[in-house]
Structure formats: C-alpha cells, structure tokens
Amino acid sequence: IQIFEYNGSAVVAMVGKNCFAIASDRRLGVQLQTIATDFQRISKIHDHLFIGLSGVATDVQTLYQRLVFRHKLYQLREERDMKPETFASLVSAILYEKRFGPYLCQPVIAGLGEDDKPFICTMDSIGAKELAKDFVVSGTASESLYVWLMLALVFNKCFYFQEADELFETISQALLSSVDRDCLSGWGGHVYVVTPNEIKERILKGRMD
Amino acid sequence: MECVFGLVGNGFAIVAADTSAVHSILVHKNNEDKIMLLDSHKLIAASGEPGDRVQFTEYVQKNVSLYQFRNGIPLTTAAAANFTRGELATALRKLGELGLLDALLLKTQCSVFGCHASNPYSVNILMAGYDKEAGASLYYIDYIATLHKVDKGAFGYGSYFSLSTMDRHFRSDMSVEEAIELVDKCIVEIRSRLVIAPPNFVIKIVDKDGARTHAWRQSVQDVTTASV
C-alpha cells in the first residue's frame, strides 16, 4: 500500500494582499472506506500562524501535539508568539530528527510575519522546506491543486495579490475542483482566511462522495 | 472477521461486538466478551489480535483506575481516549530489543548486534462513555493511533455492512429502542452478507446510569456434553 495515500488528504495555502488563506478537505478515510467527514487537518498555532498537515492521520495528530507543545514552551520563555519563518524551521528540524523513521506527514505552514507580510511554505516528510511566493499544496490531490491554482493565477492575470474575499473564492474553487477528481480526499472543505485583524473560518459544501 | 460497531443516541452510546474467539479455522468459544468496562461510565470495545486486545485494554483499564485512585475523580471519556491513543502512538514507533524468538522468526541476529524493532499493538478500539458535561460520546481509535470522535463507527469486515446500514438509518438523538433496532438491522446484515459471519453478538450500553450489558444476540450456543 502507498502509505501517504492511506488516509487521503488535500491541503493548500495561498498568499494574498496582507492576508493568507489555508484550506483543507475534511475526509478521514482508511484506504477505500470513509470513516469521518469532519476531520480537522488545519490547526491554529497562534492568531497569525496556521499549520495544515497532510498524510497519515496518526502522525498528523502526534506532530500537531508536539508542535503545539514546543510553541507553548517558546511562548513561556520568549513571552511572544513565534514568527512563521522560525516556526517553519522548527517543524523542519523536528521532522529531520526522525530522518530514518519519519513522521509520514507533509506540512503546509501559513502565517503573517513582520509588518503583516504573509508567509507560506511546505515541506516533505523529512523537513525539506519549500518557500513559495504564491501558493503551496500538499496531499493526495496535490497535482490537481497545482494545476488549478496555476490556472487561477494565469487566467485572473494575477500578477497581483488578491484581497481576502477574492482569495477565498479562488482557493475554495481550486480546492473543491481538485478534490472532486481525487477519490481519497473531499467531503467538503475547511477554509481559513487570515488578515491582520481577523480570522474567518468557513466550511465549504462540495460533492459529498 | 471480528465485527465491532457502535453509535451515539440521545444521552447514551451503544457498542456491539461479535463474541467469537477464532484461531485460524477453529472457533475456540462463542461467548468471548470483547467489550470491557473501563470504569462505571466507560466502555471499550476492541477488535484485533487476541493477546494484544486483552493485554492492552486491561492496561488501559488499570491506568484509568489508577488515575481515579490518585486524583479522586474519574477521567473524562475524551481524556481516556487521548490516553489510549497516546499509548498506541508510543508503542507504534518505540524501538525495543528483539528477543531471541522474535529474532529467529525474523531470521536476523538478535540483540548482540543491537537489532531493534517496534512493538505496536494490533488493536482497534471504539471507546464509548458518558460524562455529565459532555454527554454521551464515541471515539474511534485505529490500531495506528488515529483518534476521532464520531457519531457512529465500526471496525472489521463487518464495518462494510454496519457502516452503510447506519448511514442509511441513523439520526441524531435516537431513543434506546430505535438504536437497538438499528443495531439489530446491522447484525442481520452482517449475518446474511458476511461470508464467515460471527453467530453471536453482545450489545452494551452506557448512559447517565452507567455502563452495562444490554443484550446478547445468540444464534449458536456452546453445547455441553454429558460427562463420560
């Protein structure tokens, strides 16, 4: 069996104008069987930092618990929240620690850094960081997501960064269309659009199959 | 072929499990209780390798009791479920030494060369419980330590039938009678459509009055022979 396709997942993050959006599907499956349609893949680390984890659900949960623990310790010591770039390095280090027995997850990190500049990155299961200026994807539906988001950028002549509402539309359409072609992910979508002042969380209704 | 399934109703949770203890083609016994009482208001229905199932669920039960002795209050269902997941997750990757027998089975050199292997529990668990604040809840815990709170869940080959039946007939806040009707529908489905269907099932319920056995569904009973 392909271990990264065991539970099925789709996670995507996109940069906007002084904001970012991070979205995931909601399916928890065991190969061909669907167990739940409300699985949380995206977690908040602090108000301006989110991490979405795709891959095997057990490692998603373990890794999330470890990262929240490390961030809480950091908050106690430094008396402030971690910057997204720092957090990305932390995740990368934690993943590489297990180089020869890795966590089977691919994280997508999205946050607002200094001066509310949006930051996104993804990495593979052993912590190879990939920074991007526009969007990052992860999960079983990643290939479709790449295509959809590239098309969205090209067709909208998006050589500009979108505002929060436009960004929400773009990322939602891309997510729903991509997971509709992937049997292992879907059953709705979960989108967070984060601006410096607020976090908007929305549930998407897609094809429930 | 072990079938375990459960659902949440109005202020209660029900779990049902088959009661066959099987070893290859032989059925050792027909009345093996696979649903353990964790404490007064929690049930743990487990399926998987028999040794691991008993050992691991007893381990969880004793630790839940220990918490209650130490702290004077019982664990919540969510806490017990997370504890169980933590133990499964730790055992999943914790490297232990290979004993002589394991090494022989794997045909490698044993601890002389520092051979390590993880020793995961092969147990799938449905944990049902009732808390005053949270009400009735059901937790799905995979053998690889995937935890999820669900309204209905199932494990094993029987899950292909029971989950679909529950998807069709389940509504939130069902009464006990309606839920038992649904459980019986699932058992009928499993008995008629699963090739080596287990003949007997036990149904247990947990609500504000505690966890208890609700009913047995037996189509085959152990035959006692006259002593010679």
Image (tube, helix red, strand yellow):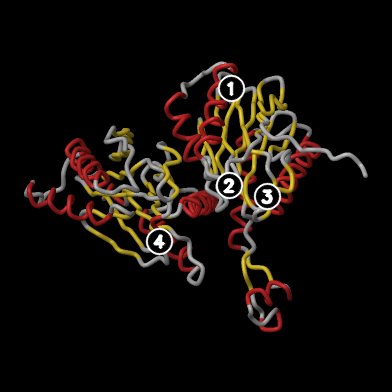
Q: Residue at x 71, y 83 (%)?
A: B112
**In this rendering, which labeled residue sits more in front, label 4 or label 1?**
1
3D distance between C-alphas at marks 2 and 1: 22 Å
Count neighbours of disc 2 (C-alpha within 10 A) and say few if under 14, some if 14 to 19, many if 20 or more.
Answer: some
Q: How many marks?
A: 4
The quadrant the N terminus of chain A occupies is bottom left
Q: Are marks 2 and 1 on the same chain?
A: yes
Q: Residue A148: percent from the left, percent from the top?
A: 17, 50
Q: Which of disc 2 and disc 3 is earlier in sequence?
A: 2
3D distance between C-alphas at marks 3 and 1: 26 Å
Q: Give residue A145's mark.
A: none
Discs 3, 2 touching: Cβ within 8 Å:
yes
Which of B220 and B121 lies nearest the eye of the viewer? B220
Most extreme residue toward the right, as rendered?
A: B228
Q: Which of disc 1 and disc 2 is earlier in sequence?
A: 2
Q: Label 1's element? A: helix
Q: Residue A82: percent from the left, percent from the top?
A: 42, 52
Q: Which residue is mark 2?
A: B1
Q: Which residue is mark 3?
A: B22
Three-letter code for the amino acid on which mark 2 is drawn: Met
Q: Are marks 4 and 2 on the same chain?
A: no
3D distance between C-alphas at marks 3 and 2: 9 Å
Q: Which residue is mark 4?
A: A2
Q: Are marks 4 and 1 on the same chain?
A: no
